[in-house]
Image (cartoon, grey):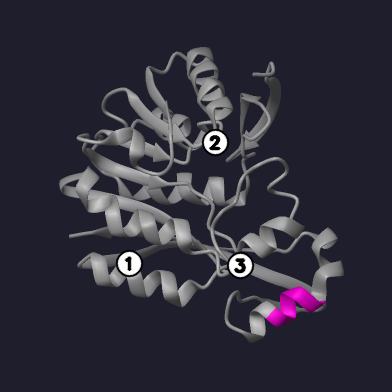
């Protein structure tokens, strides 16, 4: 394992130092959307799992906002990420149980009040041309929903009776397909936040791919004044 780099990030106008290593996903606009949505919805602190946590910034931020009642639980497929999570939590005095593994595999027999799904949710074809997945795995399928669907279908086994699952849906995936699954599994699926953002300019050179995927309903976006506008929605699901 290489030694991680420590970098300064601005998350919701707050500075945070994070250890980042190869295979560790960097914070993005979705990171802030998740933090804001979860923080606004939760009124009673509880046990929280940051699933697909990367550097751990979502769970750490929510812990600092007071919505985590006990130690923070976090997991990621990358062992490098787990080491970074442990370092980052130690830096800020946050007790954490960090585990490496795919999806819910590290958490058999465990249950939580809140699960925050921070796993890749864009088309893997888009991930390949994006600046977000440098040395980071993205096995989300052509329409970007494979991992999210697995989380949705299995989350209830890891939630307490009145528990909630928070998950982002990004327009660079098949939004309708994700929501159809969510509504088939949970009695209640509520939109909490919708944030629009411009597609990075370096991706415009792949206009043919983008248009082809949009035409086949694999992804969606709008265009305004020559700018490609995407969006991130954060939902909460519960029974």
Label number found at residue 3: none
Q: Is residue 87 left or right of residue 64?
A: right
Q: Describe the element under mark 3 as helix, strand or loop.
A: loop
The residue that appears at 55% across and 45% down in the rendered structure is 31
Please determine whether, in this image, residue 191 is positioned above or below residue 166: below
Image-quadrant location for residue 66: top left
User: Alpha-carbon distance for marks 1 and 3?
Assistant: 18 Å
The answer to whether any part of residue 113 appears in the image is yes
Which of pointers 2 and 1 lies earlier in the amino acid sequence? 2
| Label 3 Cα neighbours within 10 Å, binned few <14 / some 14-19 / many ≥20 | many
Circle 3 residue: 172
Most common SS among magenta residues: helix
Q: Describe the element under mark 1 as helix, strand or loop.
A: helix
Q: Is residue 234 left or right of residue 165?
A: right
Label number found at residue 182: 1
Please determine whether, in this image, residue 3 is positioned above or below residue 172: above
Circle 2 residue: 54
- The span shown in magenta is 208-212
């Amino acid at each position: 394992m290489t030694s991680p780099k420590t970098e300064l990030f601005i998350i919701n106008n707050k500075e945070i130092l994070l250890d980042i290593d190869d295979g560790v996903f960097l914070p993005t606009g979705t990171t802030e959307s998740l933090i804001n949505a979860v923080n606004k919805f939760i009124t009673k602190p509880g046990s929280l799992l940051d699933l697909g946590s990367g550097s751990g910034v979502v769970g750490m931020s929510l812990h600092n906002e007071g919505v985590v009642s006990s130690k923070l639980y976090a997991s990621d497929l990358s062992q490098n990420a787990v080491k970074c999570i442990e370092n980052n939590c130690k830096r800020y005095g946050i007790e954490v149980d960090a585990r490496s593994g795919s999806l819910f595999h590290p958490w058999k027999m465990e249950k939580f009040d809140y699960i925050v799904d921070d796993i890749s949710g864009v088309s893997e074809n888009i991930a390949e041309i994006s600046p977000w997945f440098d040395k980071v795995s993205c096995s989300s399928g052509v329409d970007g929903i494979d991992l999210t669907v697995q989380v949705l279908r299995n989350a209830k086994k890891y939630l307490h009776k009145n528990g909630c699952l928070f998950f982002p849906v990004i327009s660079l995936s098949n939004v309708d397909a994700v929501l159809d699954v969510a509504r088939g599994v949970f009695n209640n699926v509520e939109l909490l936040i919708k944030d629009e953002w411009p597609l990075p300019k370096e991706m415009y050179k792949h206009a043919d791919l983008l248009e082809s995927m949009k035409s086949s309903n694999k992804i969606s976006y709008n265009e305004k004044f020559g700018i490609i506008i995407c969006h991130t929605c954060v939902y909460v699901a519960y029974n």
